[in-house]
Structures are given as structure tokens and as C-alpha cells.
Amino acid sequence: MASAMLLLSCASAHPEWVKNLPQAPDGTNYNYTIGIASGNTREEATEKSKEDAYKKASTLRGGVDIRKTAGVKYGVRCEYVVKKNDYKYEVYVLLKYQIASVASGAKDDYNEPDGLKCETQIIESKNSNNDRAIGDKLGLQKRKIEDLEAIAKEFESTDNPKNKKLYWLKGKKLYDEINELQADLMNLGADKDLEPIAKIYGNMRNNCIAHSKTYKLYWNSKMENPCSEIAFSMLSKKIKMEKSQCYNGLNLSFDCSEKCIDSSLGIECSFNPSLAIESCNGEKYSMLKIKETITGFDTYNKNIANENLIENLSKADFFKEWEKQITEWVPQCAE
């Protein structure tokens, strides 16, 4: 490529090789293709445009990558840069490449004069009023992308279900904010390529969904009694759980002993339930307890005291708080 560089105004026309792809003379063992790409820096746009040209050349050669074929010469002959603002570049490159490998006996005419005359050209499109706004938004978007990349790694590495859920929710919020900034940047003409972070987020979401599909809540009570039956009935209304051995998910280990005592006022029966939230391997995550013991009273009859106890348990307010606490450990991956 010629070393000269021309700085042109935005009114300048595209060079001839951009408007009309050069055609190699008949019988030659080389051809041309144009790569086009955008980026937030000239370097980024240039590398992407070269990659675009390599892919096109490889497609024209039957899908064989010219960079991995012995005896095939190739190189960028011309470069045309459109600087739309300080944060948006569009680059065109003209790639010259050999069609067949000289290692197989093909003609080696790559370095023969081809008559092309082109310098690196830069077209400037002034838009300074937007530059500060674009810079601020790109900087903010970059920080959020870095935060999401870090959260995605934490999401993959943790086995703690509550932390995994929190990482997912934080990651989704960041991804939504990144896309909101992207919409603003598109309006300012300086949007960023989000394919890499979209892939990271997509993998995170797919892994979260796969995790959720196999993740269950298992109810295991240390004793089967009316207290256990009522607690399971109340908590399973909105939270899906099953009574079986813990396999993959959370073990809800419930304990609730019943006690009745005689007092000077009569017979008082009580429940003092607790719920341990654990992994299937026995790792303890949280212990849920009640602030005040549930009681039932009758002056003379223990059975009536028990009936009153069961009725008071079924109306107890602590189930709402327990439901909230348990839900924090349940995976959530919906959009």
C-alpha cells in the first residue's frame, strides 16, 4: 500500500475502487475483494474490515482460509477511512489475494504491476457538538460491560443458589442498561459492537435456565405431625416443593416439636417451628425461626387446647416472612 495519506473533507466522493471493485485481467492468478466494517476507533474498524475481506476471499475460494493456505500471497492494497466523529469510524480495505497456491504449480504473478493507484484516505465528518455526550455514554457503557463480564464469571463459579440468583439479577439489569445506552449511541451515530458481551450474557442466561430446570426444593421434616403438615401446606401454596430425598437443589429441613403443660390457668400446648435451608450435601445456608411460640389454650381439655394450637398455627403471620426468605434461594432466569 502506498505510504501517502490524504485527509479529505466529508464532501469528497468515495474513491473509484470503493464504488467499483477492480477486476483482475483474464489469465491472472489473483483477484480483489473489499472488506467493510465500523468501530469506535480507527484500529478497531480497520481490523474488522480486514477480517471481513479475509472471510469474503475465503468464501470465493470455496471456504478455504487464505491465511492458512501455503503458497498463497495476499495483502491490503488500499484503505479508505471515514471518520464520522471521534468515536465512530468506518473503514474500507481492498484486499488482493492469489486464487490458487503457487505450491501447486499455479502462476505466481501477485507482485506484477496491477495499475492500481490508491493512498490511505481519511474522510472527516465533523460532529463536535455530540462528541462529549458520546464520550460520556461510551465510557459509562464500557464500565457496565466490564462489570457484567465480572458478574458473569462470579455467576459461573458460585454454587450458592442465593448468590447465583443475585448475580443473575444484577447481570440482567446491567445488560438492559448497556442496551439502553446503545440505543442512545445509535441516535448519536456512535454505537459500539455488542456481540462479544451479548454472547457472554447469552451463555449466562442459558446456563441459568438449564440450572433452573433441574433445581428443586425438597421438604424433609424431622417428624410428621400436624405442625409439619400445616407448614408444608402453607409454604407450598406459592413455592413449588416436593417431599423426597434431596438430589439437586435446596433441602428444607423442618423441625417442630409439640409440648403441652399444665398451668394454674389450664392446659397450654405450643409449637416452636424452625426451618433449616441447606444444600443437598448438608451445607447450611440459613435458619428460619419464629419470634414468638405458637400456643393453644383450654381450661380443662388437652384435645381442645391442641385444636386451638393448630388453628392458631394455620393463621400465623410468620409463614409470609418464611415464604419471602425461601424465595430468595429459588433460581430466577426469566426475561
Image (tube, rainbow, N blue to C red):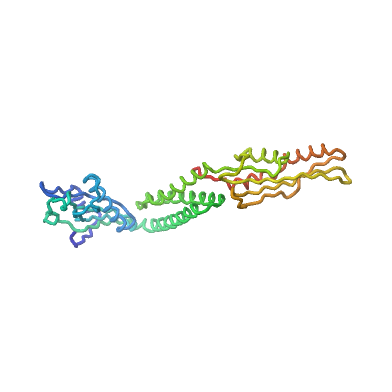
- Which of the 4 image quadrants contains residue 134? bottom left
Please give the name of the residue rendered at 63% of the width and 52% of the height, measured from the top-left corner.
286
Question: Which residue is outermost to the right?
Answer: 264
Residue 136 vs residue 75, the one in the foreground: 75
Which residue occupies the foreground of this view, 296 or 302?
302
Residue 232's quadrant in the figure? top right
Task: Locate the N terminus and report the quarter of the image it occupies.
Answer: bottom left
Q: Residue at x 76, y 47 (%)?
A: 293
User: In the visual, does 207 lie left or right of 24?
Assistant: right
Q: Where 256 sits versus 87, above or below?
A: above
Q: Total of numbered circles in the picture?
A: 0
Image side of residue 197 versus residue 109, left or right: right
Please tell me which residue is depicted at 11% across the width and 56% down the height of the picture.
113
Residue nearest the observer in this picture, 314 or 123: 314
Tell me if 116 is positioned left or right of 260 in this view. left
- Between 205 and 302, which is closer to the camera in this rendering? 302
Percent of width and height locating residue 52: 27, 50
Q: Position of residue 239 (x, y in %)?
A: 61, 40
Q: Residue furthest bottom?
A: 3
In the rendered image, residue 291, in percent from the top left (x then y), is placed at: 73, 50
Task: Please state the horizontal and vertical placement of residue 21, each as a whole percent of the image.
Answer: 18, 48
